[in-house]
Image: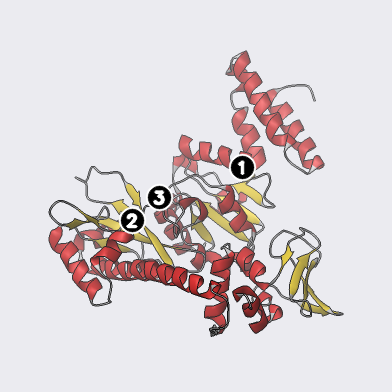
């Protein structure tokens, strides 16, 4: 019996699939190009059309066409197989093993979930256009109509009448109330269906393939005392630590420019793109994770971290410095004056280009932040700061960079080199 994966590999050319992501040139029986999985100057990435495999002599990544698609799109191999079926319109014969049936069932569940989220995003987007208060808030945040359309920003009205209206509209698309409940968008209260997103501006969240999978909701009415932001609950289709807001929209610019701007909030992301920085993504109310950085490393060489200038933002940058050493990325910190966030900084006419010119290497930023006001610290605090710096620098694989940072830290702390 032919397995599903084997059948799929027989139906597509690995050169065709890889060629969508990598510029390949013939080299004897192989094709060569720059590896999409690590930073390099040599073309160490190879594809063998005869063997239907790829291999990188630089980072040792290798495998078949499904392994490649799984790695480059940051998804599991089942999702990669489904993506191949969809992209190449592959019909699965009955003779293929029962894996196809299992995969088909999983695909139906996945497709249903994404369809519900897509419908909600579209419906809420229409509601924003109809609500004067919501439109006024979006305008007050200097979000243009073009940005509203680009990010499909929406609004969920509140109350049982609005929820009834939503359910009726969903029914016309063959989406039942239980489907909306299953996604966590609605819940069944004692008297009626309600939503944790009521009276919130909605920012639809998509995965790396552009499929709607969750929402971020922000309060905007002054009397609203709930938490400022609320994100969809996590599920097998949505993990905050693995997704970045705006990633699918920024992907093309990231590939072209080889850099990305990483911000903290939805509005910050929208504002950056609106002001001419389309290669911008945002974390989903959580700290940046290793998964986030690994995902970005497949598209860019430099990450500009543009977090808020307040204490919490600086603390997040320091955490990222400790996290990023295993990832082949150059991280640089953009510090905004006046403890502004990117959206407020740009709306007030701040000179972002100047701030970008002053961007610091994240390790240098980390060192300088730890040794700030070093002379005023207690002996125990000084020892702790030194231990943290030495521990971080020791993890950097580049010995020359280690030496430079040790000298920088020594000078900052006025210690003998």
| Quadrant the N terminus occupies | bottom right
10 Å neighbourhood of mark 3: few (<14), some, or many (≥20)?
some
10 Å neighbourhood of mark 1: few (<14), some, or many (≥20)?
some
Asked whether residue 69 appears in the rendered view, the answer is yes
Residue 370 is situated, as x and y percent measured from the top left of the image, at: 61, 29
On screen, residue 92 versus residue 36, left or right, reads: left
> What residue is pinned by disc 1?
323
As helix, strand or loop, the secondary structure at mark 2 comes to loop
Q: CA distance from mark 2 to mark 3?
A: 8 Å
| Quadrant the C terminus occupies | top right
> What residue is pinned by disc 2?
141
The number of discs equals 3
Mark number displayed over residue 344: 3
Q: Is residue 190 above or below residue 175?
A: above
Q: Is residue 237 above or below residue 111?
A: above
Q: CA distance from mark 1 to mark 3?
A: 28 Å
Outermost residue on the front side: it is 1
């Amino acid at each position: 019996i032919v397995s599903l994966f084997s059948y799929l590999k027989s139906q597509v050319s690995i050169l065709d699939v890889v060629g969508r992501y990598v510029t390949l040139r013939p080299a004897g029986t192989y094709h060569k190009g720059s590896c999409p999985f690590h930073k390099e100057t040599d073309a160490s990435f190879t594809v063998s059309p005869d063997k239907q495999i790829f291999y990188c002599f630089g980072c040792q990544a290798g495998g078949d066409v499904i392994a490649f698609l799984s790695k480059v799109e940051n998804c599991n191999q089942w999702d990669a197989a489904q993506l191949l079926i969809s992209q190449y319109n592959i019909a699965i014969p009955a003779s293929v093993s029962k894996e196809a049936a299992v995969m088909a069932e999983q695909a139906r569940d996945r497709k249903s979930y994404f369809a519900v989220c897509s419908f909600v995003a579209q419906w809420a987007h229409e509601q924003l256009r109809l609500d004067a208060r919501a439109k006024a808030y979006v305008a007050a945040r200097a979000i243009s109509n073009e940005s509203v359309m680009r990010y499909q920003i929406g609004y969920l009205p509140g109350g049982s009448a609005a929820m009834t209206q939503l359910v009726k509209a969903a029914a016309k698309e063959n989406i039942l109330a239980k489907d909306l409940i299953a996604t966590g968008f609605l819940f069944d209260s004692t008297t009626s269906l309600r939503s944790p997103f009521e009276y919130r501006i909605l920012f639809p969240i998509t995965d790396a393939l552009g499929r709607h999978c969750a929402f971020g909701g922000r309060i905007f009415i002054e009397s609203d005392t709930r938490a400022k932001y609320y994100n969809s609950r996590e599920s097998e289709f949505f993990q905050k630590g693995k997704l970045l807001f705006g990633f699918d929209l920024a992907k093309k610019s990231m590939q072209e420019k080889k850099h990305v701007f990483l911000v903290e909030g939805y509005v910050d992301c929208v504002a950056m793109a609106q002001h001419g920085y389309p290669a911008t993504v945002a974390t989903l109310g959580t700290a940046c994770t290793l998964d986030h950085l690994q995902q970005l490393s497949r598209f860019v060489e430099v990450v500009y971290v543009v977090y808020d200038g307040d204490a919490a933002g600086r603390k997040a940058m320091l955490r990222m410095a400790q996290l990023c050493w295993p990832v082949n990325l150059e991280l640089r910190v953009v510090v905004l004056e006046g403890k502004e966030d990117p959206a407020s900084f740009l709306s007030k006419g701040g000179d972002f280009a100047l701030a970008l010119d002053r961007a610091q290497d994240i390790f240098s930023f980390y060192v300088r932040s730890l040794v700030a006001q070093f002379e005023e610290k207690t002996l125990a605090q000084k020892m702790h700061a030194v231990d943290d710096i030495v521990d971080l620098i020791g993890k950097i694989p580049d010995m020359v960079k280690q030496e430079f940072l040790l000298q920088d830290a020594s000078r900052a702390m006025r210690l003998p080199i």
